[in-house]
Amino acid sequence: MGKLEDFLEERKRLGLLRTLRPAELRSGTTIRRDGAELTDFSSNDYLSLSQHPRLKEASKKAAEELGAGACASRLLSGDLKIHHDLEEKTAHLKGKESALVFNSGYQANVGVISAICGPGDAVFSDRLNHASIIDGILLSGARLFRFDHNDAGHLETLLEKHAARFENRLIVTETIFSMDGDRPPLKDIVRLKEKYGCQLMVDEAHATGIFGENGSGVAAEEGLTDRIEVIMGTFGKALGGFGAYVAATKTITQYLINSCRSFIYSTALPPSVIAADLAALELLKNEPFRRKTLLENAAYFQDELQKRGFEIHSRSQIIPVVIGNAEKTAALSSLLCEQGFFVPPIRPPTVPEGSSRLRFSVCYGHDRPILVKLADCLDKACHV
Ligand SMILES: *Cc1c(COP(=O)(O)O)cnc(C)c1O
């Protein structure tokens, strides 16, 4: 058999084969798959904005006025006023001088890290950082040092030992970890980056729209914006739209426009997408109750799980229950599906071997009875 077939067979044997199964419909927090209506606990639509009439109307209007596509990269004719409008408003939200829009968070991380770091540089990266961060580091050719998850002590050990040997040193961390829902000791990391003369980049993919004033993020919430060089985040999660941003100094964004390949060599995002992102930013200001309710829902669900004996380390709307074994996790996911909940199993290589989990994304639109019912179902399934 060929190499590809072997790979797929092996994946199947391990119970790790990934397949696509399209949803027939999404509405509110309900998803219809294979004819069954399920409450979706897997989406990143934390504020339930993707279905907001304002976003949909803004998209429609922009498509009517400007067309369905941007038709060229930003540096050619794809650059529209609306992109700049989004960049200005994003920079304002993040409290940074400048912002640059990227076509996705994946493209932002891969492009930015490989543009600001190269061979001869060092990147110190949290062990659980997102794949897009790892890929950016690998592409850069910089030396990669991984520090233990959220462990500033280990980061300092590595900095002490290695920092002086490299010309440029970058530290990268997420501010809300995508598969764990926890937060880094950001103040300590900032102190270390200053002590060892590094730059710091944070990924606010799961924090943007939720934490900080008007959803400005964790860096802003902790008052650290000015001490972090590069803050990236996405519009495709809590903001319900699509795309990503990097907020930094004007010098850094100018540099990226001139050197970042994932920015330069890709068609600009369509007006309809940018318009939805803009509408979402407006709603962060005008409908702060969404953020408040979401965080209350998340705290409530954490509490309900803890009451039933589950160990919870989350400090956000992302609430994982680590099961360990991949097949057992898949079986629990199927069981929850039979009870009306969509909670896909998260397995290696997305998470480390032996830490397969059910990851519950709590959203604004989940009401308390449904959260209690889910906690009860999980309790029954796990504690028999
Ligand atoms: C989702 C995610 C990304 C990628 O963003 P996309 O816009 O979906 O490509 C980057 N970093 C983190 C931490 C993420 O969770």
Image: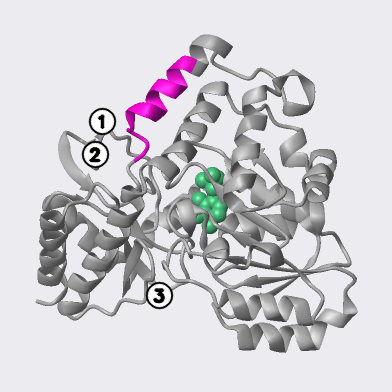
The residue beneath circle 2 is 31
Q: Amino acid at mark 3?
A: Gly
Visible residue check, residue 31: yes
Which stretch did the figure color magenta? 49-61
Is the residue under label 1 in contact with that under label 2 (CB below 8 Å)? yes
Total labels drawn: 3
Q: Depth check: give the residue in front, 1 or 205.
A: 205
Report the residue at 17% width, 57% height from top: 336
Report the residue at 40% width, 52% height from top: 17
Visible residue check, residue 3: no
Q: With 96 as the anchor, is 164 left or right in this view?
A: right
Q: Is residue 362 above or below residue 74?
A: below
Is the residue under label 3 in contact with that under label 1 (CB below 8 Å)? no
The residue beneath circle 3 is 354
Number of the front mark, 2 or 3: 2
The percent coordinates of residue 343 (x first, y second) are: 27, 54
